[in-house]
Image (spheres, helix red, strand yellow):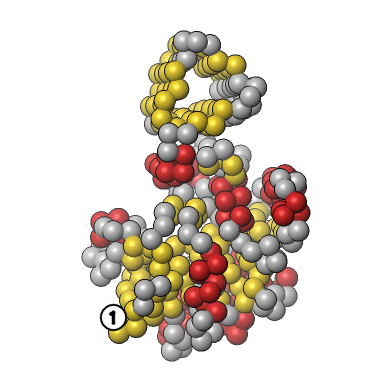
Amino acid sequence: MKHVLILAGGFATRLWPLTEKLAKPLIPVAGRPLISFLVDKIPENFPIIISTNAVFAQDFEDWKQGFLAENILNQKREISIFIEDSASETEKKGALAATALCIQKNDIQGDLVLLAGDNYFDFDFQKFFDFYDAGDNFPVLAAYDIGSKEEAKKFGVVVPNPEKISEQGGEVLEFEEKPENPSSTLVSTGAYIFPHKYFGDIQEYSADHGDDLGGIFEFLRSKNVCIKYFSFAEQWYDIGSFPAFLEANGEILGAQKIIENSVVSDENTEISGWACIEKNVQLENCILENCVVREGTSLKNVSLLNCVIGKNCVLENTDFSQKIIRDNTFLV
């Protein structure tokens, strides 16, 4: 039995004010909470644990209830919320420490599928699981060819063993953490599978390296453990920045516009590109392109390009580009 752990305990300060009061896995992407896309890809019989902090615990409980109510299939899922003992960025345990704690407290007995809650994947997870099952009980990570060594510098780079490469993946020769001169354009994403027999190693390494999730693979390799990678070509986004957030929305939506029925818009308002306009929004004489406008907001004589406007804002007679406007902003 595989158990799924979704890491959602960070405070995402780089995306403030969008994530100032909202956990990053709950930010709206293409009109849905990001984490919903992730859970959709997990088989219904896999127990899911979402590890978050004390600040956002209730938000995830609320999301869970809404997600389970979406359809009959979702109601069959087993989803639990695990609360880390942290209330701020300085108190958080780190991704690997949170993983070790969750394994221990929940007494997980099967293999562990570990997922980053701020990642968007377009590939079929069943292929990932099949690749793991066909192996020899070794850890596996999902890797994506980012196509550019300049872009690869921003990530953990996977250097394949040239003698052990197949169409679906292969063995890892070495890892390079955000290298200045990457040896490969294959980067590690936020999806991993750990066999149960390596849980002790996770506990051991996390004791002094709680925030070094990627380091667990180097630690295992130092013990002569084979690490495998599953490669995929479908779209992937690590939504750690505002440009990545905009790009993910654009990729998923294309030119689609998600506009709630309760939105009131006059004939002088133009909406182009992609858009997500939430309920009870009022638009008067506005020009919007590639924008998210959250619920309860009123816009008049406003031009927006690549923007996110928070909840319950009132904006008049202004132009914005590449901006995030926090909830309850009043600008007239």
Q: In this picture, is 166 found above or below 292? A: below
Image spot of residue 181 (x, y percent): 23, 65
Residue 201 sits in which quadrant? bottom right
| Image point (28%, 80%), residue name | 162
Direction from residue 38 to residue 286 in the image, left or right: left
Report the number of numbered marks: 1
| Image point (54%, 72%), residue name | 129
Direction from residue 98 to residue 268 in the image, left or right: left
Furthest residue in direction bottom, as rendered: 224
Can residue 297 be seen by looking at this rendering? yes
Can residue 174 be seen by looking at this rendering? no
Residue at the spot of label 1: 162
Residue 150 sits in which quadrant? bottom left
Direction from residue 97 to residue 119 in the image, left or right: left
| Image point (42%, 54%), residue name | 235
Q: Nearer the viewer, residue 205 or 217?
A: 217
Label 1 sits on what residue type? Pro
Q: In this picture, is 99 found above or below 25? A: below
Image spot of residue 240 (x, y percent): 45, 49
Image spot of residue 35 (x, y percent): 59, 51
Furthest residue in direction left, as rendered: 181
Image spot of residue 105 (x, y percent): 72, 71
Question: Would you call the spot at circle 1 few (<14 residues within 10 Å), some (14-19), or many (20 or more)?
Answer: few
| Image point (48%, 55%), residue name | 122
Mark 1: secondary structure: strand
Query: Which quarter of the image is occupied by the N terminus?
Result: bottom right
Q: Nearer the viewer, residue 61 or 70?
A: 70
Q: Nearer the viewer, residue 176 or 64?
A: 64
Q: In this picture, is 288 found above or below 174? A: above
